[in-house]
Image (cartoon, grey):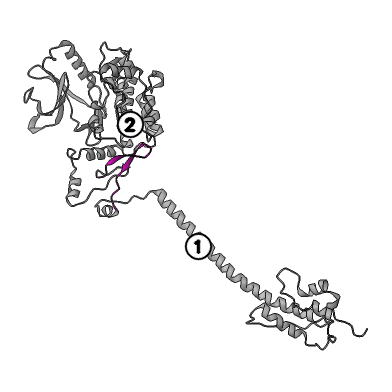
């Protein structure tokens, strides 16, 4: 294919190739300097003249032209060059394939879920094409990390339907030859049985297992041993190999890898529904993938102009919520129990966030509500403590005032018998020190004879022993001194009648 073949396309650089075709990065040539970057898949010399291979390549072009979906590489044109070689023009996905990304190390689980979900969306569309066509669906039959393209802008696209098998509206038939990569084949494909979309889902399950664990699932020394492992080998649960794999992701993985077809997911949409309910399902998966690609391929990933301007003045753009900044790579650290834990680098400091031109501080609503409840609780507790302190200060003063009158009246009643004209006892004590100090005063007043009272005779020695101590102050709510004198005093404590 020479420069300007058919006046439409130009080759720029070689991207890769296989045993039957090679892929170039090219561009269209249009009027008035119009140009668009494309990918051109050209058949190697000799294969275009092979009738059987040419028929298969034409079938690929016809099938791929019907697969118009955001997660499938679009086919734009099909033609022959000046040398008669067939070529296929496709959209150019500038980025890396999934195999190259996995070679850089383990991926964050939200990125894994996002990539697998996008692959399933593309395959789900191919398996169940819209009505109005003579095809019920298309089986890829070669799903693998090499055929999943990741753009720098976070797009995930399934490519290379070259060995796809079209299912007619009646039924699907098996191929005579086994096609595809043995390590990602389904058991029914390796056994040469009729296929449906569940065969591609098994291949997705193999990729998901490897992305969660970090190693190959079906690894053998040759193709025959690999096919034997696919058909009869034990498939370990991811958590038995890597203990930090979440259980919900493990359930989805093992159901995709079911050898029993009825137990496997029937459609890609069912698998997507379970993936989205996993705890690590991302809210911004595309942005997370962009960040990982920019981090792992910093020398190749294009830089936005706004980011370049921010870096030129020493600032970094504010990362999107839930997305790791490119400068904070994930590292794998082995714990003491042998499990592998994902450790993220520290987040940017407060000064960096405050100095960023577009930085904003996003405080979750739950944190604001918790802070409001905390302040309300502190206010209520402060008011309660203040109320208790004030009550405690007022209670002793009131009790002391009542206690000053009690002992004095008790002492007076004990020293004088009741008379017909009781003497008023309104004694003002503005600064009475205490009830104990008031008791002797009351006792002294009791020895003074009253005009209307009978003379008090000295008590007998036995009586002195019974009345040697002064009566104690009466606590509130108990019997006063007069009641005790009337009910509990002995005969010796009563005044004697000298007339007898």
Q: Is residue 273 left or right of residue 438?
A: left
Query: Residue at the spot x=18%, y=52% of the render?
Result: 313
* Quadrant of the image containing the C terminus: bottom right
Q: Is residue 470 left or right of residue 120?
A: right
Instruction: Bin the neighbour count of mark 1 within 10 Å (Cα to Cα): few under 14, some 14-19, many 20 and up.
Output: few
Is residue 129 something one can see in this rendering?
A: no
Is residue 226 something one can see in this rendering?
A: yes
Q: In x, y percent, where is residue 36?
A: 13, 31
Residue position marked by numbered label 1 in the rendering: 382
Residue position marked by numbered label 2 in the rendering: 213
Q: In x, y percent, where is residue 108?
A: 31, 37
Q: In x, y percent, where is residue 58?
A: 19, 16
* Quadrant of the image containing the N terminus: top left
Residue span colored magenta? 327-349
Closer to the camera: disc 1 or disc 2?
2
Q: Is residue 393 left or right of residue 6?
A: right
Q: CA distance from mark 1 to mark 2?
A: 55 Å
Q: How many marks?
A: 2
Q: Which image quadrant for residue 178?
A: top left
Which residue is farthest bottom? 451
Q: Secondary structure at mark 1?
A: helix
Q: Is residue 156 magenta?
A: no
* Closer to the camera in the image, 171 or 68: 171
Q: In x, y percent, where is residue 312?
A: 16, 50
């Amino acid at each position: 294919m020479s420069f300007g073949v058919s006046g439409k396309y130009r080759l720029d650089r070689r991207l890769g190739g296989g045993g039957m075709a090679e892929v170039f990065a090219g561009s269209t040539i249009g009027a008035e300097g119009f140009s668009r970057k494309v990918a051109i898949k050209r058949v190697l010399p000799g294969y275009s003249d092979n009738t059987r291979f040419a028929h298969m390549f034409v079938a690929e072009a016809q099938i791929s032209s019907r697969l118009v979906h955001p997660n499938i590489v679009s086919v734009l044109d099909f033609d022959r060059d000046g040398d008669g070689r067939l070529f296929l023009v496709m959209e150019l996905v500038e980025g890396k394939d999934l195999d190259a990304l996995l070679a850089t190390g383990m991926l964050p689980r939200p990125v894994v879920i996002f990539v697998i979900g996008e692959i399933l969306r593309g395959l789900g569309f191919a398996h169940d094409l819209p009505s109005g066509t003579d095809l019920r669906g298309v089986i890829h039959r070669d799903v693998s990390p090499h055929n999943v393209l990741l753009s720098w802008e976070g797009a995930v696209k399934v490519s290379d339907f070259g060995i796809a098998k079209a299912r007619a509206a009646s039924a699907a038939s098996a191929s005579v030859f086994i096609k595809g990569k043995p390590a990602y084949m389904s058991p029914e494909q390796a056994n040469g049985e009729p296929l449906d979309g569940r065969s591609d889902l098994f291949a997705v399950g193999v990729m998901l297992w490897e992305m969660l664990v970090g190693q190959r699932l079906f690894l053998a020394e040759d193709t025959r041993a690999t096919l034997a492992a696919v058909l009869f080998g034990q498939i370990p649960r991811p958590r038995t190999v890597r203990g930090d794999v979440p259980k919900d992701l493990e359930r989805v993985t093992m159901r995709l890898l079911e050898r029993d077809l009825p137990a496997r997911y029937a459609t890609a949409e069912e698998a997507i529904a379970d993936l989205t309910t996993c705890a690590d399902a991302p809210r911004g998966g595309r942005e997370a993938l962009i960040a990982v690609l920019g981090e792992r391929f910093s020398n190749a990933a294009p830089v936005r102009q706004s980011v370049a301007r921010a870096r030129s003045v020493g600032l970094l753009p504010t990362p999107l919520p839930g997305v790791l900044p490119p400068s904070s790579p994930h590292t794998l650290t082995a714990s003491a129990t042998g499990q592998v834990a994902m450790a993220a680098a520290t987040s940017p400091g407060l000064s960096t966030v405050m100095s960023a031109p577009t930085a904003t501080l996003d405080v979750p609503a739950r944190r604001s509500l918790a802070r409001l409840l905390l302040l309300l609780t502190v206010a209520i507790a402060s008011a309660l403590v203040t109320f208790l302190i004030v009550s405690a200060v007022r209670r002793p003063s009131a009790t002391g005032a009542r206690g000053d009158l009690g002992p004095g009246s008790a002492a007076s009643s004990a020293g004088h018998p009741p008379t017909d004209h009781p003497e008023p006892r309104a004694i003002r004590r503005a600064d009475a020190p205490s009830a104990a100090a008031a008791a002797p005063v009351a006792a002294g007043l009791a020895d003074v004879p009253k005009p209307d009272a009978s003379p008090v005779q000295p008590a007998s020695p036995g009586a002195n022993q019974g009345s040697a101590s002064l009566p104690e102050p009466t606590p509130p709510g108990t019997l006063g001194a007069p009641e005790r004198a009337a009910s509990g005093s002995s005969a010796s404590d009563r005044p004697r009648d000298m007339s007898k």
